Amino acid sequence: MTKTKILFLGGLLYLFGLSSSNAYLLWLKSADNTIENIQSIEEKHTIRIPLVGFIFDPRGDYVVDTLNQLSGTLGTTRIYHITVSPNGFSAAEVAEGKFDKQYLQFFQAIKDNNLRVVFRTMHEMNGGRYPWSSHPENFKKARIHVRDLSRTVGLSTNNILFDFSVNHRDMPTKQTPSQKAKLIPCQLSWKEKTGCYTFEDYYPWAEYVDLIWFTFYNRGKGFADRKRLTPSQIVYEKGRNPLQRIKSFNKPIIIDEVGTTAVWYEEEFNYKISKEIYKTNYKMKNTWLRQLQNLLWKEQDIIGTVYFNVDYTNGLTKKLIGEADRSVINLETKKVYNTIFTLFKNGDDLHLRSPLLNLFGVGLMEINNKETFVPLKLFSKMRTLQSGINKLWKTDEERKKILTSLSSDQLKKMFPTSTLKERENILELIK
């Protein structure tokens, strides 16, 4: 079987239409973590985004408020990728239950709204920037604790998948983790000498991880004198080789956050030059996007990529050390990188065969002109039922009338081996 490829651009999932057997779904992060941002992109560019993602930071009541609005706005036939991390708490404090209230509210909102969520929490723990990082044993206890919390409100893989999100470079600290902590740039060959931890050290039992995610960026010269690296140079980096190590977990792989600046030149960093190149050069970012696509075609084990569609610089008018504009569709500056649109394709059913849907145990199909998630065990029966009705009745009105008038006894004759529960589920789906 040929794998379906997915390309996620940070919170919104589009179809990369190259062939029916290999396709990318493009996921863009909602630029300002609002539903309105996603609706505006869909309206302006006439696209339907099957997957939508948010990274909630800072956190507050509006996180649950947003989840409560999703079913009535973006709907329940999309998959949501959502990051909620525990404010300033360490992994040890999370394991002790100090963030339980917020996690439980979040999990309950997923259940109440019948959402399907890929959940990321305490990401990039193999660095030293975040309070939950640099302590493998505490981290493992915390991750197991959080996953177990989700089960106490009745969630399962039908509604929530847990990712294990690492940075492509292991950079722990021996200090108290913070944005200013001194980092240890680990290489595998140095591990015994330095005692630095690598992402393998943080991995909880396999049953607590549904997907492996990793993050990487090409920063260029947005606000500092950095190298410009291709995606392949990053994931195959000598002495680290993060992709090969990630494959050893034998889990579905998704690039969790990825992005590139549009700014690079041979000379030493100069802010005025960087700003001018940002205004005029579209080629570099478009080229890097094509390089990312080439990596995905080569690496069949990667089923998706989340592009971090965010401009922290406000068009390079705001000086942020270490950050730069990574967006590819920017509604505020009206700056769009056209390579994205040459890769978009709508109107086929490639996203219906997404491996991500299979992990949730559902397929996506249209019933009575409405997209509906269907449990995989019923999917073939529903397709058979639809196919038969479509052949006999030509108009939407006729088909809907037949579907909605079916009884359990009629379904039993059509599917003799079906259980009463299956027939009840089918009737619920079509009515």
Image (cartoon, grey):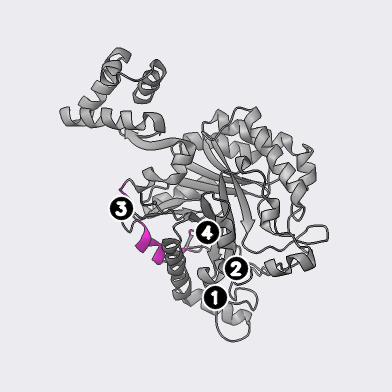
On screen, residue 362 versus residue 154, left or right, reads left
The relative height of residue 98 versus residue 266 in the rendered view (above or below) is above
- Amino acid type of the residue tagged 3 in the rendering: Ser
Q: CA distance from mark 4 to mark 3?
A: 26 Å
Q: Secondary structure at mark 2?
A: loop
Numbered label attached to residue 318: none
Q: Secondary structure at mark 4?
A: loop
Say whether marks 4 and 3 touch (CB < 8 Å).
no
Q: Which residues are magenta?
A: 330-348
Q: Residue at x 51, y 31 (%)?
A: 114
Which residue is disc 2 drawn over?
A: 324
On the image, the x and y values in percent for residue 368 come to 30, 30
Which residue is disc 1 drawn over?
A: 263
Q: Residue at x 33, y 35 (%)?
A: 366
Q: Which numbered disc, 2 or 3, marks the residue that appears first in the sequence?
A: 3
Q: Which numbered disc, 1 or 4, marks the residue that appears first in the sequence?
A: 1
Numbered label attached to residue 309: 4
Q: CA distance from mark 3 to mark 1?
A: 35 Å
Q: Which numbered disc, 1 or 2, marks the residue that appears first in the sequence?
A: 1
The relative height of residue 255 versus residue 94 in the rendered view (above or below) is below
Q: Nearer the viewer, mark 2 or mark 3?
A: 3
Which residue is disc 3 drawn over?
A: 20
- Amino acid type of the residue tagged 2 in the rendering: Ala
The relative height of residue 128 versus residue 118 in the rendered view (above or below) is below
On the image, the x and y values in percent for residue 47 come to 37, 50
Residue 406 belongs to magenta span:
no
Q: Nearer the viewer, mark 4 or mark 3?
A: 3
Q: Secondary structure at mark 3?
A: loop
- Amino acid type of the residue tagged 1 in the rendering: Val
Please tell me how many numbered marks the rendered image carries: 4
